Image (spheres, coloured by chain):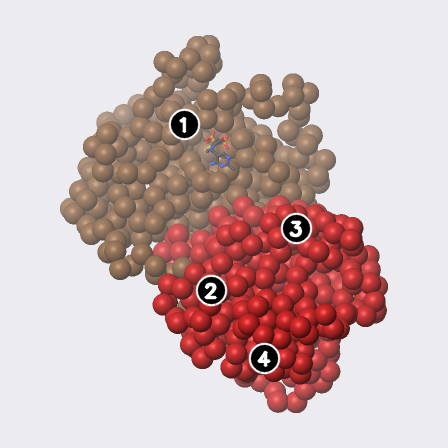
Amino acid sequence: MNGSAETRELSFAEAIRDATAVCLQRDPRVFVIGLGVPDPKGIFGTTTGLASEFGADRVLDAPLSENALTGLVIGAALGGRRPILTHQRVDFALLSLEQIVNQAAKWFYMFDGRGGTVPIVIRMIIGRGWGQGPQHAQSLSSWFAHIPGLKVVAPASPADAKGMFIASVEDENPVIFLEHRWLHGMRGPVPTGYHRTPLGKCRVARTGGDVTVVASAHSVIEAMRAADFAAAHAHIEFDVVDVRCLNPLDFETIADSVRKTRRLVVVDDDSRHCGFAGEVVARVCEAGLPLMAPPVRVTWPDCPSPSSAALAEVFYPSDRDVFVAVGKLVGRGLEHATHFPKRPGPVDVPNLEFPGPF
Amino acid sequence: MSPSPKPSSNPALAYGTGVPPDLKHLHLEMLRIRVIERRIAERYREQEMRCPVHLSIGQEAVAVGVCAHLQPADKVMSAHRSHGHYLAKGGNVRAMIAELYGRADGCCGGRGGSMHLMDRDSGFWGAVPIVGSTLPIALGLALADKQCGGNARTVAFFGEGATEEGVFTETLNLACVLRVPLLFICENNGFSVYTPLAPRRSPDFRFSDYVRSHGCHYFSGDGNDVEAVCRVTGEALAAMHADPGRPCVVEFATWRYYEHCGPAQDDHLNYRNQAEIEHWSMRDPLAISRARLIAAQPGLEAELDLAEQRQRQDIDAVIEAVRAGVRPSPETLPRGVFAP
Ligand SMILES: Cc1ncc(C[n+]2csc(CCOP(=O)(O)OP(=O)(O)O)c2C)c(N)n1
């Protein structure tokens, strides 16, 4: 990773704020726009204070016009700027699919390069918990990854959030930058200053020989907890591959791991049918990689995400579900499932500090 | 057989110069567009141009009258019916024709067809066929220019149908709140495909009030009189100049003579009423300007006819050169999904 070696402890949200500030500082072409960007909540702390630091010309509030705002940033990018557009939820960005899919994704291709590039970053937040319900908690990451021409980034750690954010702003292509809401509060070491993590490379988050667990964004957290437990109690060792970037996909890193473990579990915080997990399984099968057992997908069921915590609890696969899926695949350790530790606090928040309601 | 030369930049009409429009130049420019599009229509039947075409025959005055005010550094965007805008802005004819023929040297390398035109060198920053879609993109271009302290003008051409899209209102409002001086040029030809205005707008709808209530200038004019288009556009630009940051919508009434999409006329389908058809047939923008020119200078007739003949030879030469050209090679299919 190019950049500084020095680190400090930041939350994922602070890491995005830090990355945004670095981009605004380094490149006068960068600007941030979106509803609430300069407001007191600062998009969950990811834009706090940027307007006073960089001025209202570069950190802009906006009306609720997702589609036109997307066109606006496309045009601004064509005109030589480097815009960052924020949506407080993925669900709201659906009003801008026309511009994202028809224009941003295709502009460079459909004009055979003569139309110029569209270097924009569109931040979208995936909600979860506290009753977000059917229209504030969709992932849709597979949708975006399905569209040729869009890069789709979904980091899991504060360091990657920063490094990949900077790489996204520097990329010549439109980048859909997905942030799982439950990651915003997670803390970790983050390199200070300029720090860039190339897009399109998986991160091997944990090395082990028994099973390959492929995950992205918040699924990585669940997979890592399952891996810790499995190693400590069932002597099952996971290779955890943090995908980080759904498109372009670094399939080689996944394939290398599967060649070693010969078992595959894909954890995907998204609906199952026609989803990213299915894509990974298909690629592994098509590549003819030797598997000791059929691959397994751990995903949301194919129904909308309900509000009530009682339903949300069964809707979302948990760390324990990942452990059970692996146990079944490996054929041992399942007797430990009963004492898999529960996350402290209510089931519909990531931790006791999560304030709600969003 | 040389491809037709690029039109000389534009009549000397840059804002502030005070030079009156040179009607002969405007007429010849409209004629050039008419001749090119007529030839496209005639040769379309050969089935070698294999893409939908939306001809602007009848609407040339808006394209020419507006672009007469623009310099190459000024930026224009358009939609599905964009040949006239592209050509009036100085877009490369050969690259446009090659695009219609799906050739490698088309302005989009054969990837777009008639509905996707691009020639940034001449200031034509793109046309796409999703109705209303280039409006916010044009606004973004204008925003970029404003952020860079530039003084280029940005113009978005669209049909009145686009004003029914949410993105039109979003863009209008954004332009006003961000104070970005986009010039919106609405060509109101009264139809969205076969659908007239009545089922699309309440009789109480006042477009001018709607536009002005957002904080935007509004002007309107006769879109079939190129001098009127020039004059009204000049007034619009002057108003924008006097009040920097305020965008402007100009609505021109006009009429298309051909079918919505394709090479033929379709008045036999009876979706437009006879009285209107007759009214507009008397208002052909080229007939109007030609009559005015000849009235002022009777000897001009022969010169205009000769010019038209030459324009026809030019476009035929371009078409033959394009047809002899190569198609994009299959290996290039995946090229450019991502920019390097
Ligand atoms: C979003 C969208 N809806 C529908 C269409 C199909 N369509 C193409 S052109 C057109 C009519 C548009 O009318 P107007 O904008 O007035 O332009 P005109 O064709 O009259 O020049 C329609 C409905 C489209 N291309 N895009």
Does B133 sit left or right of B52 as displayed?
A: right
- Say which label, 3 or 2, has the lower sequence index: 3
Judge the density around disc 2: few (<14), some (14-19), many (≥20) Cα neighbours within 10 Å: few
Q: Tell me, yes or no, whether dots 4 and 3 are on the same chain.
A: yes
Q: Which residue: 63% across, 34% down?
A: B218
Mark 1 residue crowding within 10 angstroms, few (<14) / some (14–19) / many (20+): some
Residue on which disc 2 sits: A294
Q: Under tag 4, what secondary structure?
A: loop
- Chain that appears brown: B
Q: CA distance from mark 4 to mark 2?
A: 18 Å
Work out whether mark 4 precedes mark 2 in sequence or the reverse, and give the earlier one: 4
Identify the mark at residue A91; answer none if there is no mark.
3
Secondary structure type for disc 1:
loop
Q: Quadrant of the C terminus of chain A?
A: bottom right
Say which residue appears at 62% left-offset and 46% top-offset: A95
At which x and y percent is residue A32? 66, 62
Q: Is residue A109 left or right of residue A51?
A: left
Residue A347 lies left or right of residue B298; in this view the side is: right
The CA distance from mark 2 to mark 1 is: 55 Å
- Is disc 4 surrounded by few (<14), some (14 to 19) or many (20+) residues within 10 Å? many
Amino acid under label 1? His
Residue A86, position as x, y percentages in the image: 66, 59
Shown in red, the chain is A
Q: Is mark 1 within 8 Å of ligand 1?
A: yes
Q: CA distance from mark 1 to mark 3?
A: 36 Å
Q: Which mark is residue A236?
A: 4
For disc 1, the marked residue is B260
Which one is in front in this view, the residue at disc 2 or the one at disc 1? 2
